[in-house]
Image (tube, rainbow, N blue to C red):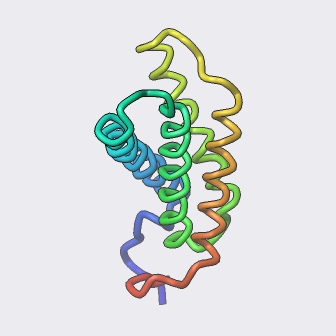
Amino acid sequence: MRRKHKNIHQNKILSNAAAVVLSIFIVIVCCIIFSAAELFFIGNMKFSMFFSAAALITGCYTGNFICGKYRRRMGLLYGTVSGIIIYIIITAAGILILENIPDIKKLLLLAVSGAAGGVAGVNSKRPVNLRD
């Protein structure tokens, strides 16, 4: 018997958009937390490059983990695509605000961490409230 109502994770585009929005939100929250920790506990900005990379990895992995957990299929592909979309958004913001383009290393970092999060989410335990 078919379900009358489809959820967001059955649509490919909406599912990927939800992963991107969630990832960007987590990256912003991690940047705020890491910059506060760096300001109050470390005292100088020597490690800001490492903290920003950690925020990107954490956000992209977590967003795609949650998306893969509910989507339950094709975590590698959607995680990689989500990482590329996040890189495009970061590049657009960098061009508008700082007038420079980020390195290609950031694209690889986001694509790999997104793919890892998607794969881990697909292979994780099935959510309790998920119905197919």
Which residue appears farthest toward the bottom when viewing the image?
A: 1
Quadrant location of residue 124?
Answer: bottom right
Q: Which residue is found at the position 47% from the left and 47% from the top?
A: 20
In percent of width and height, residue 105 lies at 70, 32
Number of residue marks: 0
Seen in the picture, residue 13 relative to 1 is either above or below; the reply is: above
Tell which residue pokes out farthest to the top in this image.
99
In the displayed structure image, the side of residue 123 where residue 132 appears, left or right: left
**Against 68, is 44 above or below?**
above
Q: In terms of image quadrants, where is residue 45? A: top left
Measuring 56% from the left and 48% from the top, which residue is drawn there? Answer: 57
User: Between 70 and 35, which is closer to the camera in this rendering?
Assistant: 35
The correct choice, above or below, for 18 with respect to 83 in the image is below
Q: In the image, residue 35 lies at what x, y percent?
A: 36, 37
Q: Give the left or right position of residue 108, taking residue 101 as reference.
A: right
Q: Position of residue 116 (x, y in %)?
A: 66, 60
Front in this rendered view, residue 32 or 74: 32
* Residue found 60% across the figure and 61% down from its top: 117
Residue at figure coordinates x 52%, y 84% from the top left: 126
Q: Position of residue 16 (x, y in %)?
A: 52, 53
Say which of 77 and 123 sits in front. 123
Establish if 104 lies above or below 66: above
